[in-house]
Structure formats: C-alpha cells, structure tokens
Image (tube, rainbow, N blue to C red):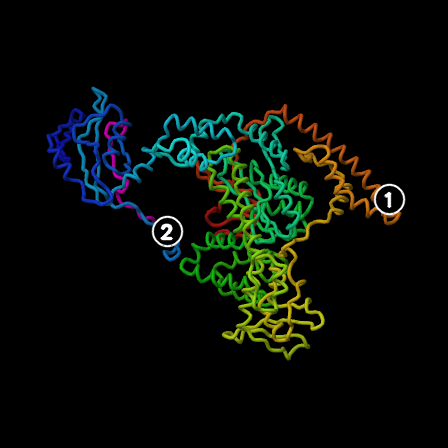
C-alpha cells in the first residue's frame, strides 16, 4: 500500500487490486472559521462547508461551495466525475506566451491570477451516489467580493415569476427597450422587490420567450408597418426554399438627409448583430451641423460581390442620386461593387483601417522599428504637394527595403489615401470611417450575436432618436452662438452653423501666429505664409484683389473642408481685406442648406422609366388635406408652365408621363402588398462571413482576396528550382 497525505484526509491506493480507499480524519471546525482572512471587502459566509459534508447532486455542491467561498469558483474533475475540485478563479498562475511581436508594441494585459490556495475537494461515493467533501483549504490571498458584487454574479442573479410575467407584458407593447423595461419594473411596478437582474438578463428572457420559427416573417411585417410611416424597404428570397437572403430599408429622415448631403457617403459592414450571422451594411452621411446621420441599412447573406451589388442598387433606386465621394474600410468585394454601380464616384479608403493592416502585416518584419516606420509613413502620407509626395515616398521605399513589396501595394492605391490626391475633393474633413464605426457601436450596444432580426430595427430607431436630439441641440447652439471680435469673419458667422463657426473662430485665432510676405519669385498676388516659430516652412496663397473669392492656398483646406484656412485669413489681414467672402465657404455648412429644387424632382419622377414598387402615399390624412397638399405643390409649377408655348408643351408632356407612371406604381404596389400578405418568409440560413469562425480553424477568404493571392504567387520565385509560382517550402522537386 502506498499512501499520500492530503491535508486531513489520506487517499490510499492498492496497486495490486487497482482500487482507491478514502480515509477521513476528524477535524476541528473552529480552525476553519479562524482561517478567514481579515479583509475589509469580504466577510465569512453564513453558509458553512466542512469536511464530511454530503451533497446529493453536483449542482447543489457547486452552489453551496460558491456561497461559502464568497468568490467565483472554477471546476476541475476527473474522468466520469469521480473526483471534483472547486478552485478560486484567482488560483493558478498566468501562462506566459511567446510572441514574435516586440514587447514595446504589445498590449498591456493585467492578469487576475495570484495563486490563491483556496480549494474544496469532493469525491463520488458510488454506493450511495452522493458527493462528499474530503479536503479543503479556505484561505484566500486577495480581497473578497462585497455583497453588492456577489449579487451581480451569474449564479446569484434571478428574476421572480411575477416580474417575468410583467416584463413579457411590457415587451408586447413593442416600443420599449430593455433598459426602459428595467426602469419601469424597478420604479413603477415592483419597487419593493430587490433587483437581482441586469439588462442582459432581460434580453435573454425576452429572447427565450420569443418564437424563433417565424421571427423573419415578423421582421418583414415590421418593415411593412414602417412603410406606412414613410419607410421604404425591399427584400429577396431564395426561389426554392423561400428563405430570406437580403433585405434593405431606408428611413424618410435618412432619405431626406442624403438628398441634401450626398457629397460624402460612408459605407461599412459590421457583424455579430443577429443570430443568423448576417452582416449588417450601414450607410451614413454628415449634415451641415457636423452630425453623423444614419440613412439606410441592409442585411446580406454573405460579403460577396453579388450581395454588395444588390445593396448598392437598392440604395441607388430609392435615392435617385449618386454619391460624389465614398469612404470604405478597403473591402475588395465592396470596392468592386462600387466601381460597377457608381463608376464616376470617388472611392477613398479609411486611413485608420490602413494603419491596422500595416500593423498586422509588418509587425513581424519590423518588430521594434514598427513605430518609427508608422510615424514616417503617415508623415509622407500627409504631404499636400504631389511632387513632394512622390519624391518622399520613393525615399521611404529605399530606406525600408524590408517592406518594399508592401509599400508597392499601398503605392498602387495612393490616390485613395494620400492627402496629396484625396484633398483635391471635398470630403467634409473626413479621412476615415470613424464616424461610421461610432454608429456601429451605438447600434450594437443593445444587440447580441444571438438576438433576433427585430432588434436591429430597434437599434436603428434608437440611433435616429439620438440623432434628432443632437440636431435640436446643434440648432439651439447655432441660434445662440456668440459673435466674434474679428470683423473679418463676422459676415461669415451669420450664415454658418455652430459647427462651422467653431472651426472658423479657431482658424481666425491661429492666423494671428502667422506672418505674410510677398513672394518676389512669382507674379503679383502670391504670398508666403509661415508660422512665427517655423519661418522656413510656408504655404503659398494666391489672391486676386478684384476677385477675392477666387483666392487659393497650397494647403487646399478650403477645398476639402469647405472653410477658409488660417493662411488665407492671415493674408487677408495683410492686404487690408475687411471681410471674408461668404461664397468661399461650402454651402453645406450654411444654416439653411439648399435643398433639391422641386421642379427637378418633378421632372425626374415624370421621366422615370422604371416604377418604384415601394412608393407610399401619406397616411393618416383626409381627402381634403391630401388635395390641399398636392395643390400647394403643383401651383408654382402650373404658374411657371404658362410663360411660353414651349414651356407649356414641356410641362403638359411631363404631366402625361407622370400620370402613366403613377398608375403603374399603384398597380405594382397593390400587387406587392397582396403577395406580401400571402407569402411566408422563412428564417435565413446561417451566413458565412469573412474572418475566422467560432468553430474551426480555417477562415473564409473572399474571391477577390483569392485572386490577389494568386497574382502574388505568380511573382514568387522558388530558391531551389528557380521556377515561378511557388516557394521552397511548397516546391515539389525537393
């Protein structure tokens, strides 16, 4: 017999018989009570656990031991659960991992492991089927949890039955979020019941109570109800299975904002918003108050070219306007779709995502020099002059030859991220998709990867509500903005929004630190603007005294931001120009932004060749109200049509075409509504998106990425056989 001493119990093993015998010695329970540490944040629990205690089930043992420990416990067990160990989650030591990345750029992570010795060991008495405690160490070497912290632990959170019933009743109203339900339960319905649940528990309760078999059909019905309030939507089903594959929607506020501010559009895809794994594509614009406005959303079955093309086609059909500048994160499938649908649009890339890609691709090659490379790379990328940028980028490639191949790839896309090229266009001061990422964060704050599709519309509505509140605050700030002491910008401040006013006042203050000198090397009207602390660095400003509004600056901020730069303001003061022309500011920053002319909308609608199946009439109005509204819209058009014979004939023909188009639209609408009422939309299949899946090791690779990798392989030369298309590791001759 061989014996191993374990605390106050001895486990003996008979090697010949292959059996294990457990002998438990008596123990003094007072010594266990004295073993609790004197901690200000933890006290001994009233639930005592001692050696020899018996538990009928493993769940009962886990619950009692957790209550006794006043701390979360982890479980380790032998095969067939014969021996169980409950360990403090602070126990053990954090394993050190070897990284190829330098420690200077590694993320600082703090471990909770402090080798806590607390442990409770149980064994299964197979004769009686109960678990018995045979060893324990109740010492902790860290502060314990308070009662409030223990109440928030998952094993201590629960919702009473009467509270569950009331939560489900409030959820059936269809207009309350989980946080609002929680507030009503705590303050109105059950103020005396102690709160032992969180918002996440309410979400799980509502999700379990919901019938998931028809949730997609309910999602389409919700969009149909939204269409009665001005929303437009369209969806596509699989012809064989009637499962949802794609769905697109756009709100009336989003459509209105896009018509006004279609010069800059951001598109981004986010995941983990629904239990089917369908990627969510969001479209956002920037209004004249500098606020990010969510315009439309789309759920796709995958992130491939065909799906993105369908989404962009739907967005184009409901807005009838093409964007001027687009920002995306560099998705190659999305880039192909943009080039196909909007070939004349200027597609720019997010500089933040470029920085992330550089870090992932070059961290192992540059190691400790990565930070220096990033600083120098973005210094070159921020150069405004094209010739200077080309020269500096060539110097950068020659200096960092270890990553020259990657720099060539970025050089091929330089017109999409380098300021020397992107600042030739108005971008509203945007150089990344961080505004879009902020909207993604707002929507996903109330969503989980296992929630139904209905919650996405709730998140969409929440973002729109928050945008309306911010718009009201921005309008108040614009109306009560204080005037400036600088007469040069006073005229401009009267017509600009508060967002543009703040920027212009900042530029005016900074212009006082600059000096202006006439450029003798050029013709009259050219001036060199330099900072007092950096006299060798200057910008070139050209001013025509008779046409001040045509002035230009080498920084081009008046072009890509739409606001006069500090260099121009300094030059205006030097030349005694008393007021900055308001025409030099982009119209989108004005208080009353110009909208699309009613006449142009009328002509576009009349001459449209394709019917819009999602046309919705105004609901909730009487016949007299509808007649008055249509009369008010057509009255100015009729007055303009009688000016001349040619104008009259043009408007007459347009009205005839418009009448035919409306009739076709109404027929299509009635047919679509009848089909929608009869058709049952089945739940979609789980989508497969890019990136590494939760289960498995192989990640999904898009077709565009596969083509790019094949092109890269063609340029690879094997060091063994000197042939192209493979390397020495995959060479078949070795």
Q: Which residue appears farthest toward the right when viewing the image?
A: 645
251 falls in the magenta region:
no
| Residue 276, position as x, y percentages in the image | 51, 33
Q: In front: 422, or 170?
A: 170
Q: In front: 607, or 597?
A: 597
Marking on residue 99: 2
Q: How many residues crowd mark 2 within 10 Å: few (<14), some (14–19), many (20+)?
A: few
Camera sees residue 147? yes
Mark 2 touching mark 1, by CB under 8 A? no
Instruction: Write the start and end of the magenta stretch as one range.
Output: 78-100
Marking on residue 256: none
**Which quadrant of the view contains residue 500?**
bottom right
| Residue 234, position as x, y percentages in the image | 63, 35
Left/right of residue 188 with respect to residue 229 in the rendered view: left
Which residue shows up at 57% across the image and 31% down it? 222
Note whether 299 is above or below 581 in the view shown. above
Label 2 – label 1 distance at C-alpha: 77 Å
Left/right of residue 247 with respect to residue 594 in the rendered view: left
Q: Quadrant of the N terminus?
A: top left
Left/right of residue 294 with respect to residue 698 in the rendered view: right
């Amino acid at each position: 017999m061989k014996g191993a001493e374990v605390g106050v119990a001895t486990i003996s093993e008979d090697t010949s018989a292959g059996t294990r015998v457990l002998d438990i010695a008596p123990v003094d329970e007072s010594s266990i009570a004295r073993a609790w540490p004197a901690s200000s944040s933890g006290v001994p629990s009233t639930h005592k656990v001692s050696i020899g205690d018996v538990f009928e089930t493993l769940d009962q043992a886990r619950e009692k031991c957790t209550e006794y420990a006043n701390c979360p416990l982890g479980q380790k067990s032998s095969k067939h659960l014969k021996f169980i160990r409950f360990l403090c989650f602070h126990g053990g030591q954090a394993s050190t991992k070897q990284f190829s990345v330098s420690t200077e750029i590694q993320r600082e992570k703090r471990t909770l492991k402090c080798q806590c010795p607390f442990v409770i060991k149980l064994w299964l008495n197979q004769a009686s089927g109960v678990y018995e405690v045979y060893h324990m160490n109740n010492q902790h070497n860290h502060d314990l949890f308070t009662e409030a912290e223990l109440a928030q632990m998952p094993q201590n959170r629960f919702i009473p039955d009467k509270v569950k019933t009331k939560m489900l009743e409030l959820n059936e109203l269809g207009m309350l979020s989980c946080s609002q339900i929680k507030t009503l339960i705590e303050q109105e319905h059950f103020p005396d019941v102690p709160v032992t649940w969180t918002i996440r528990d309410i979400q799980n309760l509502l999700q379990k109570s919901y019938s998931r078999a028809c949730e997609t059909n309910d999602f389409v019905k919700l969009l149909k109800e939204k269409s009665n309030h001005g929303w437009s939507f369209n969806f596509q089903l699989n012809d064989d299975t009637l499962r949802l594959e794609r769905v697109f929607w756009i709100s009336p506020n989003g459509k209105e904002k896009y018509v006004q501010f279609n010069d800059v559009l951001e598109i981004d895809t986010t995941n983990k918003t629904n239990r089917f794994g369908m990627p969510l594509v969001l479209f956002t614009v920037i209004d004249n108050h500098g606020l990010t406005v969510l315009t439309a959303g789309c759920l796709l079955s995958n992130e491939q070219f065909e799906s993105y093309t369908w989404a962009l086609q739907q967005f184009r059909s409901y807005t009838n306007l093409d964007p001027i500048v687009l920002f995306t994160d560099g998705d190659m499938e999305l880039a192909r779709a943009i080039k196909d649908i909007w070939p004349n649009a200027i597609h720019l890339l997010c500089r933040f995502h470029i920085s992330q890609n550089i870090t992932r691709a070059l961290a192992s090659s540059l190691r400790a020099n990565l930070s220096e490379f990033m600083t120098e790379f973005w210094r070159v990328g921020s150069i405004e002059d094209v010739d200077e940028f080309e020269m500096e980028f060539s110097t950068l490639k020659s200096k960092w030859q270890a990553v020259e191949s990657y720099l060539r790839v970025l050089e091929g896309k330089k017109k999409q991220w380098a300021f020397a090229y992107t600042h030739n266009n108005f971008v509203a001061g945007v150089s990344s998709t961080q505004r879009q990422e902020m909207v993604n964060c707002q929507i996903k704050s109330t969503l989980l990867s296992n929630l139904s599709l209905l919650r996405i519309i709730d998140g969409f509505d929440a973002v729109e509500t928050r945008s309306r509140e911010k718009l009201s605050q921005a309008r108040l700030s614009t109306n009560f903005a204080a005037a400036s002491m600088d007469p040069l910008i006073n005229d401009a401040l009267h017509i600009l929004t508060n967002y543009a006013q703040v920027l212009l006042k900042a530029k005016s203050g900074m212009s006082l630190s600059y000096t202006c000198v006439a450029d003798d090397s050029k013709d009259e009207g050219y001036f060199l603007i330099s900072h007092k602390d950096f006299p060798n660095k200057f910008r070139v400003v050209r001013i025509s005294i008779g046409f001040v509004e045509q002035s230009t600056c080498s920084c081009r901020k008046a072009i890509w931001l739409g606001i006069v730069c500090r260099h121009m303001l300094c030059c205006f003061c030097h030349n005694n120009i008393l007021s900055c022309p308001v025409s030099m500011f982009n119209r989108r920053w004005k208080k009353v932004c110009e909208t699309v002319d009613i006449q142009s909308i009328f002509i576009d609608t009349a001459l449209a060749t394709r019917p819009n199946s999602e046309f919705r009439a105004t609901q909730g109005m009487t016949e007299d109200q509808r007649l008055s509204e249509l009369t008010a819209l057509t009255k100015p058009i009729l007055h303009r049509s009688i000016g001349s014979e040619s104008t009259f004939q043009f408007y007459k023909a347009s009205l005839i075409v418009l009448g035919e188009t409306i009739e076709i639209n109404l027929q299509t609408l009635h047919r679509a509504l009848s089909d929608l009422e009869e058709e049952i939309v089945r739940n979609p299949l789980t989508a497969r998106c890019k990136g590494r899946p939760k289960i498995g090791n192989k990640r999904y690779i898009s077709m565009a990425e596969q083509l790019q990798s094949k092109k890269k392989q063609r340029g690879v030369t094997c060091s063994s056989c000197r042939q192209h298309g493979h390397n020495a590791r995959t060479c078949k001759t070795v």
